[in-house]
Amino acid sequence: MKKPKAGQLFEPSTSGSTKVNKNYRGWQSDVIVDLIKQFDFPHISLNPGASFRGLHDSLVNYGNNEPAMMVCNHEEIAIQIAHGYAKASGKPMVAIVHNLVGLLHCNLAIYYAFIDRVPVFIMGATGPMDEAKRRPHIDWTHTALVQGNAVRDYTKWDYQPTSVHGVPESFARAYSIMMTEPQGPIYMCYDAGLQESPLTEDVVMPPIAAAKVPSPMMPDTEALQAIADKLMKSENPLLMAEYHGRRQGGFESLVELSETVGAPVWDINNALSFPNKHPLCVSLDKSIFKDRDLILGLDVKDYEKATHELNNALRQLESLPPTDCDWAEIGFGEIGISKWSMDYCRMQPCSVRAIGDSVLGAKELTKLVKAGIAKDAKLQTKIDKRKKAIGERTKKTWARWQEEARANWDAAPMTQARLAHEVWEVIKDEDWVLSANDLKRQVRKMWDFDKPYRHPGTELGTSTQIGISLGVALAHKGSGRVVVDLQPDGDLMFDAGALWVAAKFEIPILIVMYNNRAYYNDWEHQIRMARVRGTDETKAHIGMDLYGPEPDFGAMARSMGVWGEGPIENPNDVQAAIRRALEVVKSGKPALVDTIVTRER
């Protein structure tokens, strides 16, 4: 018998009528492989497990390992690589996790993908659901009813088809749900017994010509006109963007809108939405809020953090905008809200709220405001005057930041600002990408984020940085861009095995350790508690420090096949080490430089 070529057990048609080639004894897991190929997934990350051994065999022997599987040392790393890849490229990956136990291993990574609005196509397995086919003990303890319940509260959808006939439709639906805004992870669970069963029946596959994802949602035109009118009447408007820059054209559309309106921009930095050195960029300067009369949110979830001053120790908030400030928004604030977690943050009352794609909305607002300006010469004069004033303010702010960065310049260990400077001196003439961490905003005060791909957004929490960074680097592999990971030490201690993944799959990434030898964020909280309660501040490090012994990250990297150097405490030695590491990265391999940084608030 002649075996069909990989991916050709089924021949999908525009009508959707397909039949199995009965000259070949296929397996039901082959159907999943055909779907992976049809939906054009670029990579598969996984931690191996027996529950999907049928699918694994189909991927290798029926699908010729195309797309290639990337073995990861932990399910969390597998999900995070897919997370970072999607943030950087806009394209989803498949991540496969083993049965119930693998799913439970990675549920924090899934939660972070959910609150970060990132599409990840997660596949898992369970059973066999047929009790007669279960191995003693292991198949029972690794099976749940219903397994998707474990992540249902923080995935957009989960499903477990009961027969092979339910696989194609549910796969297509899952892809569409995952990629429709607001995007997020989905979980598909495949019965081990289903995967390992012979394929003997006709199966209908999704038509090739079928739309994979609905078109973007245009905000209501009347609402947009109302917002445009507010922008034109406002004396001191401000544009605030969060996920706006995640979508194609977001960066460029916000530049055009802000320049047209003459409004400063606050970029929340969950996605790079605006160039940080633009004269209208006021991010990080909270004093800008105190005289605003209109704030327009563009796909914003968290208004509060930027617009309030926080007394962290007492959990007290002070609102910065005036009480009569008007608010409006375009985005997806009311769509996809979890019924379980409170990641939606505090609700901001708005006079106009338009549901829909903020990129489409920004482009339409620009047209409406330009039309208004054409009818009112005084409006253009007002806008030009405002743009000039904001530009002068921004110039002064940048000058102050550069002066502040020089404080304790020669300290050893070095300051965060000094590390940001040393890395920038090495990469500023390269086509670079910052993977996630931004040294508590120091790089945003120094580097030039002039292109939308420079930064897909910050990390989320501890144990997210290295995995997401590898995904970002994978997305840019072969592009000639230098991906830089400013890697916290505590984060790498969670998932040090990710270094091996970088070496095995030759993911070029420049890892510069942001090593303060502590879980210092929590150390800061204990200092606050000590000051409020009058207890001993010198004991705040207990349960927080990462010394005695100090991890040797350079040696750790070398042990896993990654070029490694350090630790380096003298700031004068950092730049040369990073230049050596950069040559390794340019050769197509990962490199790590361990730099020791002071603990700073």
Image (cartoon, rainbow, N blue to C red):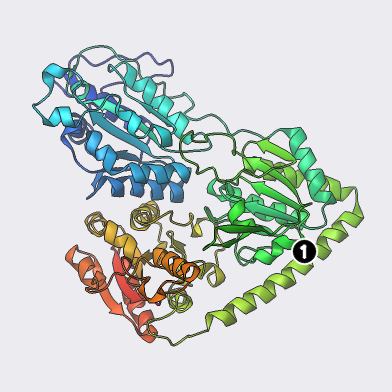
Report the residue at 31% width, 73% height from top: 594
* Figure quadrant of the N terminus: top left
Q: Residues within 10 Å of mark 1 (few under 14, many from 20)?
A: many
Q: Does residue 279 show up?
A: no
Q: Secondary structure at mark 1?
A: helix
Give left or right: position of 76 versus 133: right
Q: Position of residue 315 (x, y in %)?
A: 55, 58
Q: Position of residue 172 (x, y in %)?
A: 41, 25
Q: Does residue 105 show up?
A: yes
Judging by the rendered image, the residue that carries numbered circle 1 is: 387
Q: Position of residue 300 (x, y in %)?
A: 60, 47
Front in this rendered view, residue 391 or 294: 294
Residue 160 occupies which quadrant of the picture?
top left
Give left or right: position of 266 versus 534: right
Count of marks, rendered view: 1
Report the residue at 40% width, 74% height from top: 536
Q: Position of residue 109 (x, y in %)?
A: 36, 46
